[in-house]
Amino acid sequence: MNGFRRWMGRYMVGRYGNDELNRFLLIVSAILIVIGIFVPRHILNVLVIVCLILVYCRMFSRNFAKRQQENRKYLELKARFTGGRAAGTRQGRGAGAAGSGNVFRKKQKPAPGKRIFICPNCKGSLQVPVGAGRIRIRCPHCGSEFEENV
Ligand SMILES: [Zn+2]
């Protein structure tokens, strides 16, 4: 087991690893497996396998930019489903609207040399290169502009 761990650690060097989207896919597969116990359906098994293949392909991927982009898309979708509110709150609704933007900011990993900003208009996230001082940022989601220090 030790040897396997060491091998695994070496193998994962330079690989993308897990993120929120992978955790979500794993939860989905677990739910599908449980449903499959009660209602055996071949399609459920196929879905589980597809989910798991996706998880492993993403985990062992070396294409970080692409994976981060997928993860970002997933987080944006999720934020939309939870009414713009961030992850973490299981029973989300009514659990305090103020300050949840910070949770969202912390959860995301920006690309190197970039910072995540939350659009004050649509609450969408955008990445901005740091070190330019005070700049006008144009939101790619809704087109509104705002000023920030970067
Ligand atoms: Zn916006």
Image (spheres, rainbow, N blue to C red):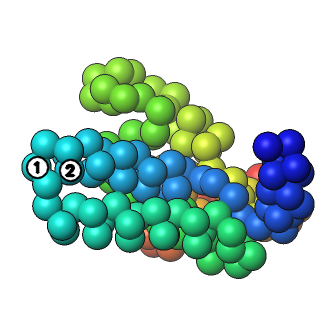
Q: Quadrant of residue 91?
A: top left
Badge 2 density bin: few <14, some 14–19, many ≥20, Cα 10 Å: some
Q: Is residue 87 left or right of residue 148?
A: left
Can you name the residue that lies furthest to the left here? 39
Task: Please state which of residues 75 and 130 is positioned toward the viewer in this rendering.
Answer: 75
Residue 94 x/y as whole percent: 28, 23
Q: Is residue 74 left or right of residue 48?
A: right
Residue at position x 48%, y 70% from top?
53
Residue bearing mark 2: 36
- Amino acid type at image mark 2: Gly
Residue 1 x/y as whole percent: 79, 43
Residue at position x 80%, y 56% from top?
8
Res. 34 in view: yes
Residue 39 circle label: 1
Q: Quadrant of residue 46?
A: bottom left
Res. 124 in view: no
Residue at position x 50%, y 56% from top?
21
Task: Please state which of residues 124 and 26 is positioned toward the viewer in this rendering.
Answer: 26
Badge 1 density bin: few <14, some 14–19, many ≥20, Cα 10 Å: few
Label 1's element? Answer: loop
Q: Is residue 23 left or right of residue 148?
A: left
- Amino acid type at image mark 1: Val
Residue 2 x/y as whole percent: 86, 42
Can you name the residue that lies furthest to the top here? 95
- Relative to 58, say whether 94 is above or below: above
**CB under 8 Å between callouts 2 and 1?**
yes
Residue at position x 52%, y 56% from top?
22
Label 2's element? Answer: helix
Task: Please state which of residues 141 and 132 is positioned toward the viewer in this rendering.
Answer: 141
